[in-house]
Image: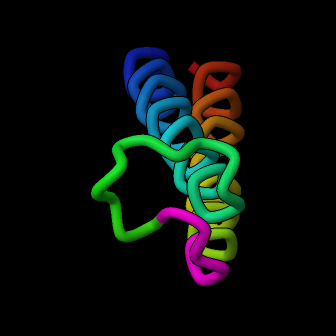
Amino acid sequence: MRALGTLFIVLGAFVAFFGTFFLLQGLGIIMWPAESFMLADQQWVWNGAIIAVAGLLVILLGRTLRRRG
């Protein structure tokens, strides 16, 4: 269970990072890459926030699994 928990933590961090990146692109704070369809698009603020929260939940699940293992 410990290895599975570690895997969940790593995957959750990856998902949370990209969710935050998408959120910041949607807000127009990160304007890279220039050809991205997500730039300054309100829909990607919400999508990114949901993805980031999902990543945080996966991290919490991974931490719980590591404690049990």
**Looking at this view, is 50 or 58 the one in front?**
50
Total count of labels = 0
Q: Residue at x 39, y 16 (%)?
A: 3
Above or below, 35 against 16 in this view is below
Q: Residue at x 35, y 43 (%)?
A: 33
Quadrant for the N terminus in the image: top left
Quadrant for the C terminus in the image: top right
Span highlighted in magenta in the image? 39-44
Q: Position of residue 39 (x, y in %)?
A: 51, 63
Q: Residue furthest bottom?
A: 43
In the image, taking residue 17 as reference, residue 28 lies left or right, namely: right
Residue 49 image-quadrant placement: bottom right
In the image, taking residue 21 as reference, residue 63 lies left or right, namely: right
Q: Residue furthest left?
A: 35
**Looking at this view, is 32 or 44 the one in front?**
32
In the image, taking residue 57 as reference, residue 62 lies left or right, namely: left
Quick check: is 52 in the magenta stretch? no
